[in-house]
């Protein structure tokens, strides 16, 4: 059965009135995404004995602006549903045939031009994801990743920096540097901001003389620690949780906001909360200036 794709304009684009539009395309294994503030629809289409990959670009009122057609091997029903990502500023669409462990990649730039078609990439090598943990941060052609290793002495945290080799093939990376945290008592590390000069992390230390929440600034080129700022006052027992941030481009300040729990409400060692009877939700906001104060 051909896919009938219904898009709610209210969901995909800002509108001033409640309305819906519809695109009815004769494609299968279809998907869609918003990329570069435009709607893209993609899927497979059989034309006689041939099968084609189709990509449509739509305006905000769901009018087809242009399309692209690429002939591929096999029948459409031999493929899994198509998937995509927008890694490194490209629209990357992945085609995988059933019962295979290889993927083909169609990569498009922001001008809707096919940059490269990469055929039969091993799934295990796709974007070299085995290098990265679930905690990653992307900045242009660089990926930062938090890695942990556990042994009898506890858990060790690292930040690794990888740089993209080429955008004309499967995304493979070159290792650049590693920053090892102090070994004891780190319970979590969250990457939240990077630019060409530095990368920032929100780190929670669960016990010991450095118990509390910290913002670490690492040098983007060398991986060296530039500044460690503790959010807690001296002898303070509250715990600050990361919520969100804003970077001020003019003053180079970082604004942080999130939830604050008191010592009875959260035990940093056991990582257990006790907020059943808390009548209020306490939030915090703070500013770190350009040097980390």
Image (tube, rainbow, N blue to C red):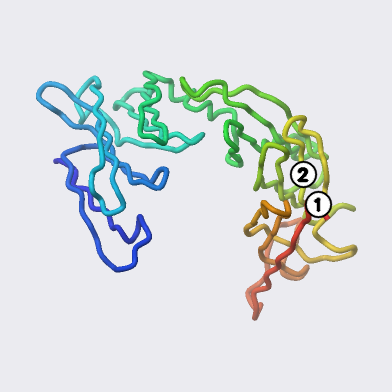
Residue drawn at x 64%, y 36% is 145
Measured from the top left, where is residue 98 in percent x and y? Answer: 29, 27
Q: How many numbered circles does the render carry?
A: 2
Residue 5 appears left or right of 164 = left
Q: As drawn, which residue projects farthest toward the bottom? A: 279
Measured from the top left, where is residue 269 in percent x and y? Answer: 77, 56
Q: Do the residues labelled 2 and 1 touch (CB within 8 Å)?
A: yes
Mark 2 surroundings: few (<14), some (14-19) or many (≥20) residues within 10 A: many
Seen from the viewer's position, the closer of residues 204 and 184 is 204
Mark 2: which secondary structure? strand
Q: Which label number is shown at residue 273?
A: none
Mark 1: which secondary structure? loop
Residue drawn at x 78%, y 66% is 238
Seen from the viewer's position, the closer of residues 289 and 174 is 289
Seen from the viewer's position, the closer of residues 269 and 102 is 102
Measured from the top left, where is residue 86 in percent x and y? Answer: 45, 38
Q: As drawn, which residue projects farthest toward the front? A: 250
Rendered position, 148 above or below 18: above
Mark 1 surroundings: few (<14), some (14-19) or many (≥20) residues within 10 A: some
Measured from the top left, where is residue 132 in percent x and y? Answer: 59, 33
Rendered position, 100 above or below 258: above
Q: In which quarter of the image is residue 99?
A: top left
Residue at the spot of label 2: 217
Residue at the spot of label 1: 292
Mark positioned earlier in the residue sequence (2 or 1): 2
Residue drawn at x 72%, y 51% is 252
Residue 145 appears left or right of 155 = left
Q: As drawn, which residue projects farthest toward the left? A: 48
């Amino acid at each position: 059965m051909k896919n009938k794709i219904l898009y709610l304009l209210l969901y995909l684009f800002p509108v001033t009135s409640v309305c819906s539009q519809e695109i009815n395309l004769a494609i299968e294994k279809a998907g869609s995404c918003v990329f570069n503030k435009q709607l893209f629809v993609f899927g497979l289409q059989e034309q006689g004995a041939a099968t084609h990959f189709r990509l449509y670009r739509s305006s905000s009122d769901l009018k087809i602006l242009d399309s692209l057609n690429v002939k591929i091997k096999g029948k459409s029903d031999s493929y899994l549903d198509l998937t995509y990502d927008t890694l490194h500023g490209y629209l990357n669409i992945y085609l995988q045939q059933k019962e295979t462990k290889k993927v083909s990649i169609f990569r498009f730039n922001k001008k809707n031009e096919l940059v490269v078609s990469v055929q039969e990439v091993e799934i295990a090598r796709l974007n070299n994801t085995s290098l990265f943990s679930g905690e990653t941060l992307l900045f242009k052609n660089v990926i930062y990743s938090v890695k942990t290793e556990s042994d009898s002495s506890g858990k060790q945290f690292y930040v690794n920096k990888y740089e993209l080799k080429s955008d004309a093939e499967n995304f493979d990376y070159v290792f650049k540097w590693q920053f090892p945290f102090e070994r004891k008592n780190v319970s979590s590390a969250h990457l939240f901001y990077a630019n060409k000069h530095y990368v920032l992390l929100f780190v929670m230390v669960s016990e010991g003389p450095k118990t509390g929440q910290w913002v670490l600034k690492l040098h983007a080129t060398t991986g060296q620690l530039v500044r460690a700022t503790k959010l807690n006052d001296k002898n303070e027992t509250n715990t600050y949780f990361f919520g969100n941030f804003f970077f001020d481009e003019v003053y180079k300040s970082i604004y942080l906001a999130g939830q604050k729990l008191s010592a009875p409400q959260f035990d940093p060692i056991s990582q257990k909360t006790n907020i059943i009877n808390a009548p209020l939700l306490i939030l915090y906001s703070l500013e770190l200036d350009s040097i980390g104060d």
